[in-house]
Amino acid sequence: MHLLWVELRDFRNHAETALEVPDGLVGVVGPNGEGKTNLLEGIYYLCSLTSPRAPTDSPLVRKGVSSAYLRGEAEGREGRALVEIEIREHGANRTQVNRSGVRRRRDLRRSLRAVMFGPHDLSVVQGDPAERRSYMDEAIATLWPPKDSLSRAYERVLRQRNRLLKDARGMGRPPALGTWNEELMRAGISLMSTRAEAVEEIAPDTEEVFRRLSGYGLDVEYRPNVQGEDVEDVEEAFVRRLAEREDEEVGRGVTLVGPHRDELHLVVRDMAARGFASHGETWGAALALRIGLAKAVERQIGEVPVLLLDDPFSALDPERRRRVVEMLAGRGQVMVSVADEDHLPRGCAAVWEVSAGTVRVREGTAGAAQ
């Protein structure tokens, strides 16, 4: 699949940006703070209905207006899809695909798939386990859009169970705890099983990308909080763990067993990446996780997702930059932002120059006025 054109209006600092999107590698160049990242973020939002940088949508709307608008058209095996999004500063957003309303992200992701890397991804490697759980859940939503509700379903059960435990502190075992244990296990086992599948899909490509980039290995391993050989084993282990920690849960008023305590274990040179990897290794691992996800999506759906790389080269030496560009060659639409003109990959199908929220297509590249 590939994007044909995109429009951003009143999105972040882009008052009005309209671009044709060629196949191949697109370089996005300009000084820091001018709107390169905002442009890639807008394209990613157009494909996914979510921002990797903002937990809420209100910061996406340009100051002084009430709504931002994103439009674009993509073409894939199932034909063309026209996507139109209104992001409101207050109230519900509106999304249409081919003029029909869409309410759920998974419905949009059937038409468009995108993967985005940025400096914020360093937290996936060096941050708390919650960052790596979020990565796994985002990978699920990208690989299998119909399953993107699994993590939210589990979180709803977890909140309800935590509320029950909190309200019962000092009063003994709540009568309804058995019912919520069943709900927690049902939602938790579904989520853990799907996380395991996602990591199984992503790990080989991620490890290969990192090895090509660094010359040595990265191990990617899913470590669920409740383990077993099969679903029956996991269910038995879940029951046992809940029973073992029931008194502690009731005393503390919080759930201590379940996939909200899972971990994605990343190992570089036999040491945990978190806390021990160098800055360059951390950067390489974060980049490999995103490129690995893009490769897994391509294998799953038989089409290449749009790949958005925000400032991927700044922490890499010239040889590693060359290796990344080599890996990206011929893999569909890839948009790479750089602040340093010297980091702009050679042979770009188009170069977009960004300044103060405006974009000019460099003369002599695809989309430029002739």
Image (tube, rainbow, N blue to C red):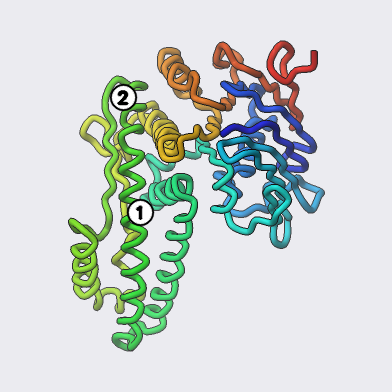
Q: Secondary structure at mark 1?
A: helix
Residue 222 visible? The answer is yes
Place of residue 282 in the rendered image (x, y in percent of width and height, measured from the top left): 38, 32
Kind of residue indicated by mark 1:
Thr
Quarter of the image for the N terminus: give it: top right
Residue for point 69% across, 61% down:
92
Horizontal side, residue 143 vs residue 203: left or right = right
Residue type at tag 2: Arg
Q: Position of residue 40 (x, y in %)?
A: 62, 34
> On the picture, is 116 further left or further right than 185?
right
* Quadrant of residue 207 within the rendered picture: top left
Circle 1 residue = 194
Q: Which mark is residue 211?
A: 2
Which residue sits at x=42%, y=40%? 300
In the depicted structure, whether residue 180 falls above or below residue 357: below
Q: Nearer the viewer, residue 159 or 233?
A: 233
For mark 2, give the secondary structure: helix
The image position of residue 43, as x and y in percent, is 63, 38
Tell me the quadrant of the picture where the C terminus can be found.
Answer: top right
Q: Picture quarter containing residue 170?
A: bottom left
Q: Earlier in the sequence, mark 2 or mark 1?
A: 1
Identify whether 99 is placed above or below 43: below
| Left or right of 23, for residue 271 | left
Q: CA distance from mark 2 to mark 1?
A: 26 Å
Q: Mark 2, mark 1: which one is toward the viewer? A: 1
Q: Is residue 286 at all visible to an observer of this figure?
A: no
